[in-house]
Amino acid sequence: NSSHICHNGGIYKRPFKESFEETPMLVAVLTYMGYGILTLFGYLRDFLREWKIEKCHNATEREEQKDFVPLYQDFENFYTRNLYMRIRDSWNRPICSVPGAKFDILERVSYDYNWTFKYTGRIVNDVINMGSYNYLGFAENSGVCADAAAEMTLKYGVGVCSTRREIGNLDKHEELEKLVAKFLGVEASMAFGMGFATNSMNIPALVGKGCLILSDELNHASLVLGARLSGATIRVFKHNNMQSLEKLLKDAIVHGQPRTHRPWKKILILVEGIYSMEGSIVHLPDIIALKKKYKAYLYLDEAHSIGALGPTGRGVVEYFGLDPRDVDIMMGTFTKSFGAAGGYIGGTKELVDYLRTHSHSAVYATSMSPPVVEQIITSMKCIMGEDGTTLGQERVQQLAENTRYFRRKLQEMGFIIYGNDDSPVVPMMLYMPAKIGAFGREMLKRNIGVVVVGFPATPIIESRARFCVSAAHTKEMLDTALNVINEVGDLLQLKYSRHRLVPLLDRPFDETTYEENED
Amino acid sequence: MGLRSAWKQMSWLYYQYLLITALYMLEPWERTVFNSLLISVAGMAVYTGYVFMPQHIMAILHY
């Protein structure tokens, strides 16, 4: 029932089922029409606000600044005032309990169409959580991890009050780093206090001017920020498309740097393990083959895939049965599967020693807080089985089962679901702008908390609801959630799928790499 | 009984209309503006058709 891996040969031998069904033409036309109507009404409202017929709630320039260059005229501000504000109650919901499988929400009401909110004082209890990145269910306030973290608070306190380089290097940090290195199968690792800062502060330490970064189209903002801060040349290849990547690599090797045609100092390929907006898994065997052929370096961001993929939860490298030493820099976060905060980078000892001295995050950022470190240590030992129980292994298997079940049921119901069959991130397409707000509200009415995403995190017509399956969900909870989703899907007419599953577009199906199995 | 289920069906259809045209997100006065514009344009089209269709059909048949 869990992900089977062939242990001979190491190349993934199961059919790699990833699908991104095409947007139906009628739905696309109606979505554009909906956005057109909203834009027209947006212009009308802006006109009324400008001529003071209507009260203006949002930020505008002061009278003295009216002759300066206008600040709020770009599309982003127009979108925020006129489209985002109208359905703003689906986001930033205040949660007042631990975000486990079920949580409590403070009820809010707005009397001026979402410009201001008031709390009614009521708490909505036991809302099923389909939005938290709680893949292995370690976000809990009782149990071994929470007790260990509490003990650590009593022993070390909460604040460290210094950076790693100065006097904030606790023995717990060293223990954590050794444990992470053992978990991943690499020589050494280093842990940082913030996952976003791990990416954005360490990529500038690794590459600089005269280097080339090849980054995937749909990379996370932290990777993009890190790449831009480094000052290297950035070239983007189509999402998960190996032909596009190979073409860029060939061009880079043949032509070299733009004007001087000297060879690039370093070529770094930036990819993620699971892309959280699409639910797709990176084609790691292909990338490693390309990297070895063209002598490039690989930076793998396993923010969502660590703990969630692979038979023992070691991430996407184990999922494909590959050698962790092939990936030069393995980065990941502790926020998702481990229920804590922070990020890590793993690799060879030389790499990690270099980062300890040259990374901005290591030199200037305060080190991780002790209870957080203890939470990671306990949860990692639990996953590895070192605490003597099989709880970690059971959770990994439960997650794989839950993922398969949830995805299969949603696809049978007729929704358009993006991504790989094994990824615990399940994006369900909504498309129309009104359905974004309606879906969030209707699900909350029926006691399910979901995350809906629209522009600018996704392309303008491809708005979606993103479910995150967790090992803490029991089958009953998933069944309840699925029934509710079915009901809301019928009410809002969300079942767009025509069951014509197209394998990943722009990628010719390569029979030689992935063999079809009949199991 | 039939009237109640017909009323339910009509209100579900109106809900779908609101979702597809994104009127669901607009305030009630905006919905009134849009609906009145739509009904007046549709009404004008129907009236024009009612006035001119017989003449057009007779002209086609006489040709």
Image (tube, coloured by chain):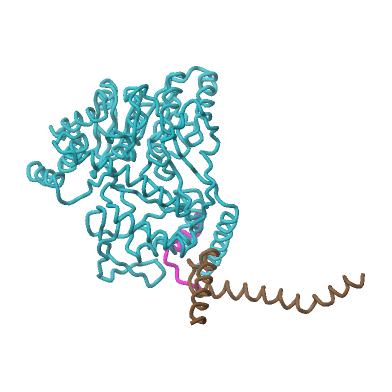
Chain colours: A cyan, B brown
Residue A61 visible in image: no
Residue A413 visible in image: yes
Residue A421 as seen in the image, left or right of residue A340:
right
**Image quarter (top left, top right, bottom left or bottom right) of the N terminus of chain A:** top left
Above or below: residue A59 compared with residue A17: below
The magenta segment: A50-70
Above or below: residue A441 compared with residue A469: below
In front here: A337 or A11? A11
Image location of residue A426, percent across then percent down: 40, 48
Residue at coordinates 34% horizontally, 49% vertically from top-left? A468
Image location of residue A129, percent across then percent down: 30, 55
Examine the image and state in which quarter residue A338 appears.
top left
Residue at coordinates 80% horizontally, 76% vertically from top-left? B52
| Magenta span main SS | loop
In front here: A227 or A181? A181
**Image quarter (top left, top right, bottom left or bottom right) of the C terminus of chain A:** top left
Residue at coordinates 23% horizontally, 28% vertically from top-left? A181
Image location of residue A200, percent across then percent down: 35, 36
Above or below: residue A135 compared with residue A359: below
Is residue A51 located in the magenta-colored stretch of the structure? yes
In front here: A367 or A219? A219
Above or below: residue A343 compared with residue A496: above
Examine the image and state in which quarter residue A393 appears.
top left
Residue that sits furthest to the front in the current view: A518
Examine the image and state in which quarter residue A349 appears.
top left
Residue B38 as seen in the image, left or right of residue B54:
left
In front here: A489 or A220? A489
Residue B52 as seen in the image, left or right of residue B19:
right
Image location of residue A449, percent across then percent down: 33, 58
Is residue A504 located in the magenta-colored stretch of the structure? no
